[in-house]
Image (tube, helix red, strand yellow):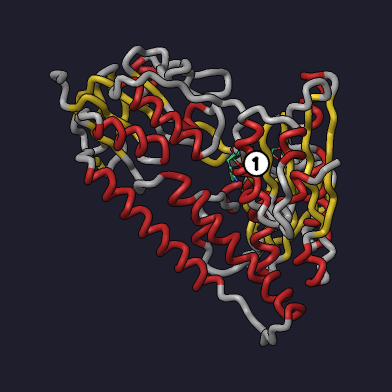
Amino acid sequence: MSDYDFDLFVIGAGSGGVRASRVSASYGARVAVAEEYRVGGTCVIRGCVPKKLLVYGAHFAEDLHDARRFGWNVPKCDFDWPRLRDNVLGEVDRLNGLYTETLDKNKVTIFHERATIEGPHEVRLASGKIVTADKILIATGAWPVVPEIEGAEHGITSNEVFHLETLPRRVLIAGGGYIANEFAGIFREFGSQVTVVNRSDMILRGYDEQIRDRLLQISMAKGIIFRFNAPFQKIEKLEDGSLRAHLDGCDPIDCDVVLFATGRRPNVAGLGLETAGVELDGKGAIKVDENSRTSVENIYAVGDVTDRIQLTPIAIREGQAFADTVFGNKPSVVDYNCVPSAVFSHPPIAAVGMTEAEARNKLGSVKVYSSDFRAMKNVLAGRNERSLYKLVCDAETGKVVGIHMIGPDAPEILQAAAIAVKAGLSKADFDATVALHPSMSEELVLMR
Ligand code: NDP
């Protein structure tokens, strides 16, 4: 046991920080965590969880519509945003309570205030109290980037979108990534007019081109408007309270809400990193080695603040590996190969491994199998929306190096298929597996 107040002081009680705290404490470490907002972090409080609940809520628009084709007499339905919003926020409160309880049960001391680093072993709390610790773990996550343009203060980010007082009639979304496409789908299903504006000419950079194109086509068919190569110039507030966005290369757009979904930046400002000598990389993320150790021997960092892969399950794995290695006597490192990901758009996208273009660059000789089909449910519903699944294989060995999907429940299907890719299975192994009929996922083993 060290002479410090704690063996470990964690700054930030999000996915990575909570996992690291809880597991380190279970190994017998005396742990404290400081959180200036709410225990749970971005994922639970203003990210994955409330977003997914809104995605479910939005999808009822299509389900209620399609139900009529399946024989149900559905009366005219209308949507009540405040009811969904409050129910979602209620669920967030419940999870916030559970996360806090988990820390309490593991005897982790929680300081509900901001903490800054004063030295390698010293942390100052907002109240002025100084706390010492043998090791410090920074798990402060990331924060939405708001472009520096005139009138930016009139826009909101994913932090505020869950709290909107009323459902906006017209939404303008800046950015073409995860958050932009997920909220474009959500608001469109709720009946808002949605325009997505991006500075470049593509959505979802990094995803397979054909899959991205399919989402773009389907989104446009649903009535979402896209404007590309149109950086923001300024946002003007009009007399009636609405907003006018001025963009390069296209006419101004009037709307009720501007949502900035232009990336997330590591949360390092004002943490005292310079005082302690913790180095940042060129993009402002904390530099760490494979054990999440920073340039200061006893200071570590996990999760979005290190910008390795900005995904909750990665932050959790990094937090777990840190605790196992430092306090559990079970050295481990996170394997970043074949990390599956999903975009909860309407319909969703899911992917694991290399895109076709990446595989061609890396392997040279590639064989691609695809299935372009209309889900049975969509056929009866008269919904002209096609799914696309792609299997990218090494042409020499037959090994499946990537799977890319867009269609109903794609993320639910891909999680299991990702095991096969991670395990290095080949197209022959997929072919040898009997189809589960009738399902959408059977397409994965029927591609010829
Ligand atoms: P993304 O990185 O996905 O996309 C950012 C978008 O904003 C891109 O289209 C980019 O354009 C554009 N952009 C970036 N900087 C600027 C700028 N200064 N001015 C104008 N446009 C800009 O970011 P998100 O905000 O959507 O999400 C942040 C991160 O959160 C994601 O990277 C992801 O890791 C995580 N996330 C994951 C989700 C999931 O797993 N389902 C859901 C939500 C978030 P360009 O293409 O030209 O670079």
Q: Where does residue 415 sit, x and y in percent of width and height?
A: 60, 43
Q: Mark 1 points at which residue?
A: 417
Please tell me which residue lies in front, 318 or 381: 381
Q: Is mark 1 on a helix, strand or loop?
A: helix
Quarter of the rendered structure image containing ligand 1? top right
Question: Residue 1 vs residue 260: left or right?
Answer: left
Q: Where does residue 263 sit, x and y in percent of width and height?
A: 61, 38
Dot 1, how many residues are within 10 Å of its Cα: few (below 14), some (14-19), or many (20+)? some
Q: Quadrant of residue 18?
A: top left
Report whether the residue tagged 1 is closer than 8 Å to ligand 1: no
Please tell me which residue lies in front, 196 or 419: 419
The residue at the point 51 percent across, 49 percent down is 47
Q: Where does residue 42 sit, x and y in percent of width and height?
A: 46, 45
* Image quadrant in which the C terminus is located: top right
The residue at the point 61 percent across, 51 percent down is 412
Task: Please determine whether, in this image, residue 89 is positioned above or below residue 283.
Answer: below
Task: Please determine whether, in this image, residue 49 is positioned above or below residue 445.
Answer: below
The residue at the point 28 percent across, 30 percent down is 24
Q: Where does residue 226 sit, x and y in percent of width and height?
A: 80, 52
Question: Residue 445 vs residue 109: left or right?
Answer: right
Task: Please determine whether, in this image, residue 93 is positioned above or below residue 120.
Answer: below
Whether residue 432 is visible to the viewer of this picture, yes or no, is yes
Question: Residue 84 vs residue 150: left or right?
Answer: left
Task: Please determine whether, in this image, residue 280 is positioned above or below residue 229.
Answer: above
Under mark 1, the amino acid is: Ala
Q: In which quarter of the image is residue 177?
A: top right
* Image quadrant in which the N terminus is located: top left
- Number of labels in the image equals 1
Whether residue 235 is visible to the viewer of this picture, yes or no, is no
Please tell me which residue lies in front, 216 or 380: 380
The residue at the point 32 percent across, 29 percent down is 116
